[in-house]
Amino acid sequence: MVPCTFAYWGMIAFGMLFELKDGSVSQELPFLLGAAIVAVSFANWGQWLINDLYDKDTDKHSNQNRATTQNEIPDRITLLTGVALSVFGGLFAFVINAYALFSVLGFIVVFAAYSIRPIRLKSNAYTAMLSIGLLGGCCFLLGSATVVDQPSPFTGLIFTLITLVMTINVSYKDIKDAEHDEKSDSENFVVKFGRDRVRRLLIVGLPASYFIFGMVFQLYSWLPIFAVLALVVVYLLYDRTDKYHRLVYELDAINGIYLLMLGIGYYGIQVSIL
């Protein structure tokens, strides 16, 4: 949960830096950024609790020590806690502006549809991947909302690009639970196409996305740094053939670092041309 949240923080930072085109930083921006980070953290943690509640069948195979699996916490308490955390997330977003509130509400709605039956988007390989892509896109919009009150057409274009790229590359999150998901009849991308095939796809797709975004934002001087991150990703995907939980956490952290670097690089270009 923590590495995943870190990646969302990176997306928020990228969204914020993306909108700072004139190089000016308002006095309240640190407060607004903090509110955005707290908002998505609460929303993410709340929805993860609800997700765990609906994942009991899978967790009986893969996460037997979870409190929800062992019935240490009543389902009602788990559900209420998840809802309460999500509401707190929305309240922190409301402090920023309406744009931020709708971004967090979008995050919560997509995550709920991802987890909760009968919709349960995670039960289908393609809708599961699209859901995670949309979650990342919502975090980008939340970061944007710390600077502006409404998105521009270019912001909408980048949101679409982020969603598509994350949709393609997010399948690494399901690698660690592939065998257990198959036992519980959960048809995600890894179960559908096989762990090894997905790993080979990611070895190409994930590093390629680093360069694609770098060139879209004309960060040519940053490409060597992105190349180093890409090489680390390739090494991890090639090496962690029996340490899949560790692999997911490491890739989440690297993606968060990459997004932060991407935002800093883009901000630097905007400041330099003023």
Image (cartoon, rainbow, N blue to C red):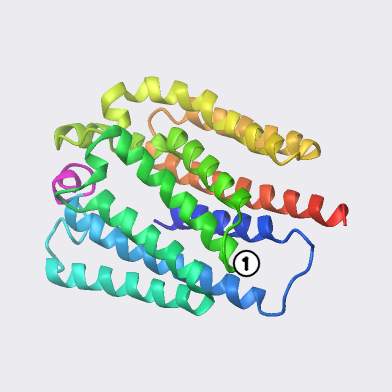
Which residue corresponds to the image point at 13% horizontal and 70% vertical from the top-left?
76
Q: What's drawn in magenta, residue-wise? A: 56-63
Q: Percent from the top left, x then y, of residue 213?
A: 64, 38
Q: Nearer the viewer, residue 152 or 87?
A: 152
Vertical order, 77 against 191 (above or below): below
Which residue corresponds to the image point at 24% horizontal and 60% vertical from the top-left?
50
Amino acid at circle 1: Val
Give the image quarter of residue 148. bottom right
Q: In the image, is 172 to the left or to the right of 52?
A: right
Q: Is residue 104 visible?
A: yes
Which residue corresponds to the image point at 19% horizontal and 48% vertical from the top-left?
119
Which residue corresponds to the image point at 59% horizontal and 28% vertical from the top-left?
208
The kind of secondary structure the magenta stretch mainly shows is: helix
Q: Is residue 74 visible?
A: no
Name the image quarter holding the N terminus. bottom left
Vertical order, 205 against 54 (above or below): above
Q: Nearer the viewer, residue 185 or 159?
A: 159
Q: Percent from the top left, x then y, of residue 236?
A: 52, 32
Q: In the image, is 157 to the left or to the right of 79?
A: right
Q: Percent from the top left, x then y, of residue 94?
A: 46, 76
What residue sits right under mark 1 in the picture? 148
Vertical order, 60 against 190 (above or below): below
Residue 225 is covered by the magenta coloring: no
Mark 1: few, some, or many residues within 10 Å (few <14, many ≥20)? some
Q: In the image, is 266 to the left or to the right of 136?
A: right
Name the image quarter holding the C terminus. bottom right
